[in-house]
Amino acid sequence: MTSHEQEFAEFAEASAPRLRRAAFLLCGDWHTAEDLAQTALAKVFVSWRKVRRQDAAHAYATRTLVNSYLAEKRLQRSTEIITDQLPDCPAPMLAPETRMVVLDALGTLPPRSRAVVMLRYWADLSVDQAADVLGCSPGTVKTLGARALGKLRGVLGDALTDPGPPRHPPGDRHQAEETWHG
Amino acid sequence: MDDKSLHDLLNGALAGEPPLGPVAQNALAAGIRLRRSRRIRAAAAATAAAAVIAVTIPVGLGVRGHLAGPEQPPGTPILYVGTYTSKLHTRHTYGGTVVPINTATNTPGTPIQLVGGPNSPTIADNVGKIAITPNGKTAYVTTDSSVTPVSTATNTPGRPIHIAPSANGFDYPDFIAITPDGKTAYVASGWGTVTPISTATNTPGKPIPVGTTSFIGTDIGVGQIAITPDGKTAYAANSSSVTPINTTTNTPGKPIHIAGLLQIAITPDGKTVYAANNVGTITPINTTTNTPGKPIHVVGNFTQAIAITP
């Protein structure tokens, strides 16, 4: 193994679990999530010389992951039926049920909104960082995020009475703008 | 529930996370293939006048009939090209095939579709290497999860042979070398073993462990196998050692450590194995004693390609 390959291997080993979790929140399926993480990492390897120099490998991997997911959704619109009519939802009291409810709720979101939810509320990115990952303006991220939260609130009901501000790095100037009031 | 933040809900949705597969290893292998295919496509685009995106790329080659012998089949040599259509490029068709090319007319024949292991029973992932038996009758093709013998007379694939299956169903056979007598094919796996396959019965023997296999360490698997002209020893190289395998008993000898090993070559008299590495030296290995000699220093850091005149 060359030194590049070894360096990448160490990075991939360290970041694969987190990338797969992020991918799972996007696609809702662990097998697809693993494929997405793997595809993203393979693409990172192709650009390894560039990204490792900039020390931006993790951000690049996340961006590649989201782009791979969005590209796949564009190609395969028919594989997942998006509906806002959910089957009967039991009261979200037990952990496995909550899990299903949250996943179902995420499933009602369009791909880009779902990506915003994952990036903003799970990966704790700022509006600017999420915009950078998605390749869109901060305004679009805010719009997509607000719509997504509105929809999630509608589906999750009292499970999400107050999403609260996402965890921000100190001094995030977008924190004040982001609390959404339904 | 009421006070749970969305972050916690999202984290809760991750409950029941299954164990992680070999994502990092697979990504590295896929990344190497992707980079290779992009380089080939870039080269093709530079020379082609029309802007054509080739999704099927040749990844392995083998020519039948280049060795004269009593069992030489009649007819023109056939060039076998292993191709892989990546699912990263197209979602409709992908997988590994072998395309026979008639070298008299240079026209490709019908692609031979390969099948993979339990995880990809209808389509093969990737084509690793092709090796053709000295009598020219069979081409052995490795994919990510199978070794498939292809009859060169009919260009039909035989039943795939699975070696050293791992937890995810992919055994990653890659490099394949056939003994001069044509009786045994030695297949390197991505998990650091070499499996002998009897070419008479197409059944795999017990995997032979070679070197170490820790992924994060220096070894990802066996990268190359070279067999001495007398057929008595197969040298299996990974990225830090060369292991001699006695082909009569199929037992490994003591690994000979070569830091940063990249490629090996055996002299025609079979007396020396030369090992090239990524530290700018070539190490001669005496095949009688299997001990390394004094490294030869050359210009450059990566001495990665070596070949010996016949």
Image (cartoon, rainbow, N blue to C red):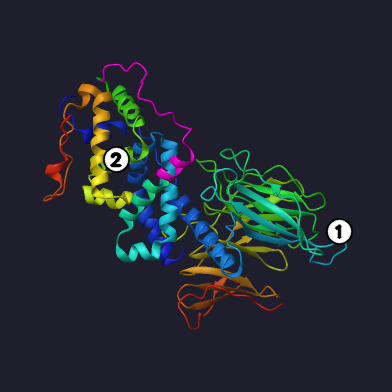
Residue to which mark 1 is pinned: B73
Question: Residue A73: within the magenta?
Answer: yes
Residues at discs 2 and 1 in contact (Cβ within 8 Å): no
Residue to which mark 2 is pinned: A118
Q: Is mark 2 on a helix, strand or loop?
A: helix
Q: Report x, y in % for residue A144.
A: 27, 39
Q: Is mark 1 on a helix, strand or loop?
A: loop
Tell whether B156 sits left or right of B235. Answer: right
* Residue A71, above or below B80: above
Q: Give the magenta-colored segment's residue range.
A: A69-92
Tell whether B186 sits left or right of B36. Answer: right
Q: Report x, y in % for residue A23.
A: 37, 41
* Residue A102, above or below B83: above
Q: What residue type is labelled 1?
A: Pro
Residue at point 47%, 59% (across, down): B219
Q: What residue type is labelled 2?
A: Met
Question: Residue B274: within the magenta?
Answer: no
Subunit bearing disc 2: A
Label 2 Cα neighbours within 10 Å, binned few <14 / some 14-19 / many ≥20: many
Q: Count the labels in the image.
A: 2
Q: Report x, y in % for residue A169.
A: 15, 49
Disc 2 and disc 1: Cα gap in Å?
62 Å
Say which quarter of the image contains residue B122: top right
Residue at point 40%, 46% (across, down): A37
